[in-house]
Amino acid sequence: MSLHDAAGQYEDALKIAFKLYAKTEKPANKSDILAHMANFSLRAGHINDAQKYISEAEKFMEQGWDDEKDPVRSIGNARFCLRER
């Protein structure tokens, strides 16, 4: 996923992220993957998809926060990118 991202292959990164998301169970991890998906979508020009992924990511982050309490998740980066557009 990271290699595709670095190479600007955002659609390919999204495909891998979808597969990873389907196999992930913990809410905070799902949130993190969705935030990555939002970033890939933004870079690919899919603004509406990015906003949808962020909304879902925020819900999962709230569910998993008590278990993980990790403030340095990708959700922050994706939120910032959406605000800056």
Image (cartoon, grey):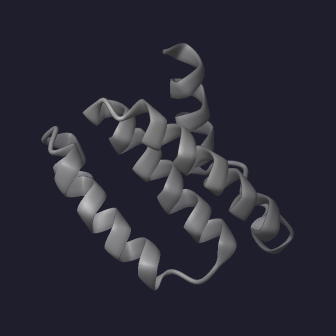
Q: Quick check: can you spot residue 1? A: no
Q: Residue furthest front?
A: 48
Across and down, in percent, residue 75 comes to: 60, 46
For the point 33% across and 75% down, which residue is it? 19
Residue furthest toward the top? Answer: 84
The residue depicted at 76 percent of the width and 69 percent of the height is: 64
* Left or right of residue 63: residue 31: left
Q: Residue at x 38, y 74 (%)?
A: 20
Answer above or below: position of 44 versus 66. above
Q: How many marks?
A: 0
Return the residue nearer the eye: 15 or 5.
15
Q: Is residue 84 above or below residue 46?
A: above
Counting from the top left corner in percent of width and height, residue 18 is at 36, 67
Left or right side of 43 for 26: right
Q: Is residue 55 above or below residue 85?
A: below
Residue 37 percent coordinates (x, y): 41, 51
What residue appears at the point 61 percent right and 51 percent down from the top-left corner? 73
Q: Quadrant of residue 43?
A: top left
Residue 39 in view in this figure: yes
In this view, the residue in front, 25 or 56, is 56
Q: Residue furthest right?
A: 66
Q: Looking at the figure, which quarter contains the N terminus?
A: bottom left
Is residue 63 rendered to the left or right of residue 78? right
Horizontally, is 44 left or right of 49 in the view?
Answer: left
Residue 31, position as x, y percentages in the image: 60, 60
Please identify the quarter of the rendering in which residue 28 is found: bottom right
